[in-house]
Amino acid sequence: MLAWEKPAFDQPFELWREEGVLHLVLAIGAHVQIAHMKEFIRLVAAMDRSGQAPVMIEYPEHVAVDERARALLRRVCGAHGHPVALFAPHHSSRAQAELFKHVERPAFPFRVFDVRDVAYRWARERRQMSALLQSADKDR
């Protein structure tokens, strides 16, 4: 496994696109503030103009997300509908993600996983379903 290195632009995450899935990897111990969330949302919008690409988030231990940042993410993602596969390998991060899921009840498809490959497969399946629906709409 690669060791995390501090990003050049001082963001507590890395983001890239692979096989139609946007990958967001948070740093261990990251404290995600509203400015970070705004940058993440801006980058996702730039990388996916359709607003439908699934996002796979790797959520390690000791991550804290400010309430205002969480509210912004819920509002923006609820409007766009990006499916989110959240990979949380540690019990504490998984418990935090499950709490978000049950308390916030996001309006977008949201699943929590403890196995990276299963989370990635779910995200790719969401991408494939979206492509099939778009294809069917074009045939009408």
Image (cartoon, helix red, strand yellow):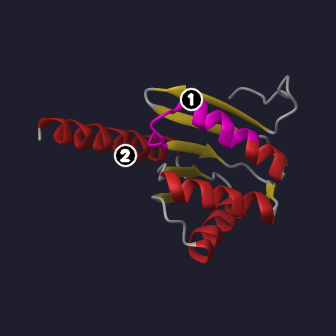
Name the quadrant containing residue 134: top left
Residue at the image point whose x is 51% and y is 50% from the top: 85
**Element type at marker 1?**
helix
Categorize mark 1 by other alpha carbons within 10 Å: few (<14), some (14-19), many (20+): some
| Distance (Cα) linking label 1 and label 2 | 17 Å
- Locate the C terminus by quadrant: top left
First in residue order: circle 1 vs circle 2: 1
Relative side of 92 to 47, left or right: right
Q: Position of residue 55 (x, y in %)?
A: 53, 43
Residue at the image point whose x is 69% and y is 66% from the top: 96
Q: Does 45 lie within the magenta span?
A: yes
- In the drawing, what numbered circle is on residue 47? 1
Q: Position of residue 1 (x, y in %)?
A: 68, 29
Choose mark 1 or mark 2, whichever is in front: 1
Query: What residue is pinned by disc 2?
Result: 126
Find the magenta span and give its range. Answer: 39-54
Relative side of 111 to 25, left or right: left
Residue at the image point whose x is 85% and y is 27% from the top: 9
Name the quadrant containing residue 40: top right
**Element type at marker 2?**
helix
Q: Does 53 lie within the magenta span?
A: yes
Inspect the image, locate mark 1, and give the three-letter code of the amino acid beneath it: Met
The residue at the far top in this view is 8
Foreground residue among 66 and 68: 68
- Residue 16 sits above or below residue 115 on the image: above
Residue at the image point whose x is 34% and y is 43% from the top: 125
Q: Position of residue 82 (x, y in %)?
A: 49, 49
Relative side of 109 to 60, left or right: left
Inspect the image, locate mark 2, and give the three-letter code of the amino acid beneath it: Arg
